């Protein structure tokens, strides 16, 4: 428990948010794990975030900030208002263990958001969280516990685009405008849209369903606003458009061999789980779940990029990639001939 003056509330299990202003340090006491929820807009009730609506000079010692210091630094002695400013702009104080755990959880959340918002431009299918994690690790991306996950996810996407075959999934929109403006609007949408999927004309209105990059949504909205008084509307049909189906990775094996002709990947056979011969054949520690029919197949694997990549992961104490995961990793890896070496920051 923290030390408090007589008659004051005893604070336990506290996360401290600190802000230094005009050379003076101010602190507030918050509940653990609630600060980022409030900053990201998940938690709306500040009473669920603040343990007490008072500004401290030192939370651990239980020393309140002086009124004159508050007025000098913030121009006001309003405790609630100052608490909100510190909550929004202050630095969350964490122990090293808490910071590492918080960063790991935040990075996982960022990677999940990136995977939800992005596609592989070659297959038009979703990318996996695991591949996003590996790509960001190669780019030395560091999660900042003081910034919302969504904002950092958008920054991460911009880092990945151009270096990896990852891009924002398009939105599907429906624009309805008066028939009298059909030609002009269609020209504008054609210049903005990735793809016009369908058009339909009634006696009064013309509708267009199209795909567009999320960054161009405001341009589309501006077009709709021009015709709002005449009944023009813009409807979001889907925030992200991705190809669906099960053949997301295995169907790209041949594409992987074209992208990486020097990979020398050995043909492999997967033994059915129910097969009595599953324990027979030759295995390699760097080929999880794979049985090689001949020694020649095993030797080809030992010379492959998959084997070398898993050896490196094993030496770093990281989980090995199954063959399908490695194929996806190859598809998302930057072209070594196109990208300069040492692209890390």
Image (cartoon, rainbow, N blue to C red):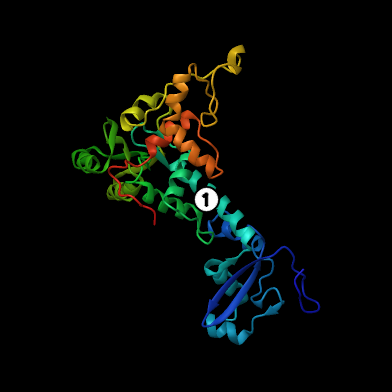
Q: Residue most toward the top?
A: 276
Mark 1 element type: helix
Residue 296 visible in the current orientation = yes
Q: How many marks?
A: 1
Q: Is residue 206 visible?
A: no
Q: Position of residue 105 (x, y in %)?
A: 58, 50
Q: Position of residue 158 (x, y in %)?
A: 37, 50
Q: Position of residue 333 (x, y in %)?
A: 38, 40
> Which residue is at 40% across, 48% downward?
157
In screen coordinates, is 74 left or right of 243? right
- Residue 274 lies in what quarter of the image? top right
**Mark 1 = which residue?**
107
Residue occupying image coordinates x 77% and y 70%: 10
Q: Is residue 188 left or right of residue 218?
A: left
Relative to residue 29, is residue 327 depicted above or below? above
In the depicted structure, whether residue 191 falls above or below residue 296: below
Quadrant including the N terminus? bottom right
Q: Observer-nearest residue: 252 or 294?
A: 294
Residue lying farthest right?
A: 7
| Front residue of this view, candidates 143 and 265 | 265
Q: Quick check: 87 above or below 63?
A: above
Mark 1 residue crowding within 10 angstroms, few (<14) / some (14–19) / many (20+): many
Picture coordinates of residue 4, whole percent (x, y): 76, 76
Residue nearest the observer in this picture, 237 or 36: 36
Question: Residue placed at 66% from the left, 71% from the top?
Answer: 53
Q: Quadrant of the C terminus?
A: bottom left
């Amino acid at each position: 428990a923290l030390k408090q003056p007589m008659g004051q509330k005893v604070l336990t299990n506290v996360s401290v948010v600190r802000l230094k202003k005009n050379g003076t340090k101010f602190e507030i006491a918050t509940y653990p794990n609630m600060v980022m929820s409030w900053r990201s807009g998940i938690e709306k009730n500040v009473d669920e975030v603040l343990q007490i609506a008072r500004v401290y000079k030192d939370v651990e010692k239980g020393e309140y900030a002086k009124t004159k210091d508050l007025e000098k630094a913030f121009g006001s002695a309003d405790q609630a208002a100052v608490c909100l400013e510190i909550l929004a702009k202050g630095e969350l104080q964490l122990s090293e263990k808490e910071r590492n755990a918080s960063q790991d959880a935040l990075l996982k959340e960022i990677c999940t958001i990136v995977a939800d918002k992005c596609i592989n431009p070659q297959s038009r299918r979703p990318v996996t969280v695991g591949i996003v994690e590996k790509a960001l690790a190669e780019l030395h991306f560091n999660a900042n516990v003081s910034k919302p996950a969504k904002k950092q996810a958008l920054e991460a996407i911009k880092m990945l685009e151009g270096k990896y075959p990852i891009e924002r999934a398009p939105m599907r929109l429906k624009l309805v405008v008066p028939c009298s403006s059909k030609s002009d609007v269609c020209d504008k949408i054609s210049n903005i849209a990735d793809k016009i999927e369908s058009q339909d004309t009634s006696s009064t209105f013309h509708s267009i369903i199209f795909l567009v990059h999320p960054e161009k949504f405001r341009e589309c909205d501006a077009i709709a606003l021009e015709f709002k008084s005449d009944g023009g509307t813009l409807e979001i049909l889907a925030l992200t458009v991705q190809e669906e189906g099960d053949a997301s990775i295995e169907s790209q094996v041949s594409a992987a061999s074209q992208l990486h002709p020097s990979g020398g990947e050995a043909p492999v056979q997967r033994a059915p789980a129910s097969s009595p011969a599953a324990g027979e054949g030759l295995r390699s520690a760097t080929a999880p779940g794979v049985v090689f029919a001949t020694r020649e197949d095993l030797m080809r694997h030992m010379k492959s990029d998959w084997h070398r990549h898993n050896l490196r992961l094993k030496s770093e104490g990281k989980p090995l990639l199954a063959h399908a995961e490695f194929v996806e990793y190859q598809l998302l890896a930057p072209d070594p001939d196109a990208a300069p070496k040492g692209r890390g920051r």
